[in-house]
Image (cartoon, rainbow, N blue to C red):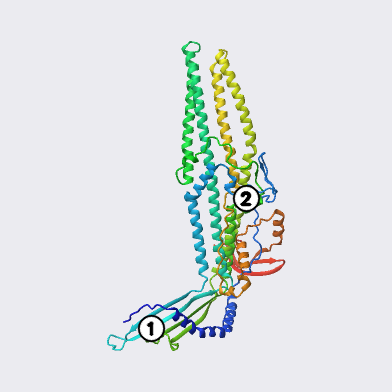
Amino acid sequence: MSAQKNITLSSAAVANIATTAQPALAVLRKNGGRLIGLTALALSMAACNTIPKADMRPVLAEPNIPIEQTYGAFDKETVSSADQPSIAGQRWQNFYSDERLKGLIALGLENNKDFESARLAIEKARAQYQITDLNDLPRIDGSGGYTRQAQNRTDKNPNSSYSVNLGLANYELDFWGKIASLKDQALQNFLATTAAKDSTQISLISNIAQSYANLSYSLAQLKLAEATVESREKSLFIADKRFEAGIDPKLPSLQASASLENAKLAVLRAQSSILKARNALQFLVGGPIPTNLIPTPAVSNITNQQIFNAGLPSELLRYRPDVLQAEYNLKAAGANIEVARASYFPSISLASSVGLSSGSLDNLFKSGSVGWSFGPSISVPIFDAGRLDANYDVAKIEREQTLAGYEKSIQTAFREVSDVLATRATLGDQLAAQYRLQDNFEQTYQIADARFKAGIANYLDVLDAQRSLFSTQQGILDLELQKIISQVELYQVLGGGANLDVPTVIPVPHKNLVQLVNLPANSNKAKAVDAIDAASSARVASAQEAQAIKQAQPTEKATFKPTAVVDVNNDGKTDAAVGVVTEKTTFNDTSVEQVPVTQIVEP
């Protein structure tokens, strides 16, 4: 039988235990040479594995787009120049001028559920990073217990024992950078999440602005349709009176009635568009739209810009958060390679404990009851059937995949900007032509109406002129809407709308005990350098630079030497060969590594 009780440790007791732990520290200093020798032995054992060479080459992104050149296909209101700041560098509060729209954007950023999920994702990523970082801190556990024990049921003298212990759990010394790489990977994942939030914000602001413009021009279409209905009601009244007076046959009256019904259908379609636009805007804002924030019909301008500067394609690397997110993912994949490479090396951990035990509570904290233990442990990968090699290969392939995704994100950004610029290139000319058509059809309608009233033309000419004028006016509203939408889209695809004035809070990781001895690396300047490097933007090589780097990169060759041939169906012909593939990587004609691999290949 046994019984246990919890004992609360006072600060004095902890201090006493710490004092009694000094012999353990002395033993650590005394046996430091043994630890070094054990480490050397572990390294020599680990050398049985072929450890990949550290790849110090820069990761080369080749999106194959003219990064440093200007964009093409510009209208009179759009330029591409490095001499002026890109509109993507403006805060959305400064880019947009419509106060009603700015109020709706503020509501959306506060209430939209997608944006709220993106914010929560940042908090989750931050917590996950903290978990990875805190795992690198030494953990000291304290415990206390009371035990009363008898040998058997007839034992008349049961024993009592009290114990108090402090123990350092297995703490890994990061000699090879594995833990640091895991932290770096978690940090890059966190930064990628912040970039994803910025992407969500940019998309939300753009969608609100476009829905605002859609609602405004749906109201304008309704206003135009209602004015057309009123005009055609007058035309129908005149046609009916002329028919009743016997001036005209029934046909003009029927044609005027049909024209009126078409205008009423346009009213109904405009009303439906208004309801849909309001629903879309309400969904984005995350609540009912205040009456004072409803747009006026056909807003002519919602930005402060007269000239829209697209900047240079290279600025997409800084302003587009989806490109930054892809870059952070690429960095995380690079850190994963370092984790896989560090797994080849021994894992060295420390564990220690110091405790007190006594048969009586009064003698528990006396010096004679002290016991301690200390011991490093080393785990060495000797034979794993190729798992480390496979994991390392997977990590390298994943980085290549992530690199391809990064390059594609740059190409996608460039294409989206080019598409918006192509749309804007002819909008001004289209609007000018449409306004000229409106003037033409207004005169045509006036002439046809006068000729009809004079009895020298039929009513069909009047109807044709009415329909053409109404269609042209609708087309003008559509083009004006496209012009507003293109301004919003250009700001979006350039990366405008993120919180450029709100700095990203980059957590500083704790140092491993191995790194603590390097005092310069723990200075505030070193911490700032690490944080800036973690969040820095990528530099994409030009075509000429990419070619030069490619020529300087090592070459990889694989040769197959058959050791046996196999005749599967016994027909006297060789069906397969078993041999050794030797992969040879060369840096400046210097052999670095040879890895034998047994493989079956087709002849």
Residue 560 percent coordinates (x, y): 64, 65
Q: Does the CB distance between marks 1 and 2 fall below 8 Å?
A: no
For badge 1, the amino acid type reads: Tyr
Looking at the picture, tell me which residue is in the foreground, 499 or 257: 499
Q: Quadrant of residue 30?
A: bottom right
Q: Is residue 159 above or below residue 190?
A: below
Instruction: Classify mark 2: residues with Cα within 10 Å, few (<14), some (14-19) or many (20+).
Output: many
Spatial separation of the CA atoms under disc 1 and disc 2: 68 Å
Q: Which residue is mark 2?
A: 89
Residue 482 seen in the figure: yes
Residue 168 percent coordinates (x, y): 48, 77
Which quadrant is the N terminus positioned in? bottom left
Looking at the picture, tell me which residue is in the foreground, 134 or 397: 134
| Residue 468 numbered mark, or none | none
Residue 382 seen in the figure: no
Q: Which residue is mark 1?
A: 162
What residue is rendered at 35% in x and 78% in y? Answer: 5
Residue 137 percent coordinates (x, y): 52, 72
What residue is rendered at 60% in x and 44% in y? Answer: 490
Instruction: Classify mark 1: residues with Cα within 10 Å, few (<14), some (14-19) or many (20+).
Output: many
Give the structural element (helix, strand or loop) at label 2: helix
Compared across the picture, whether 123 is left or right of 431 comes to left
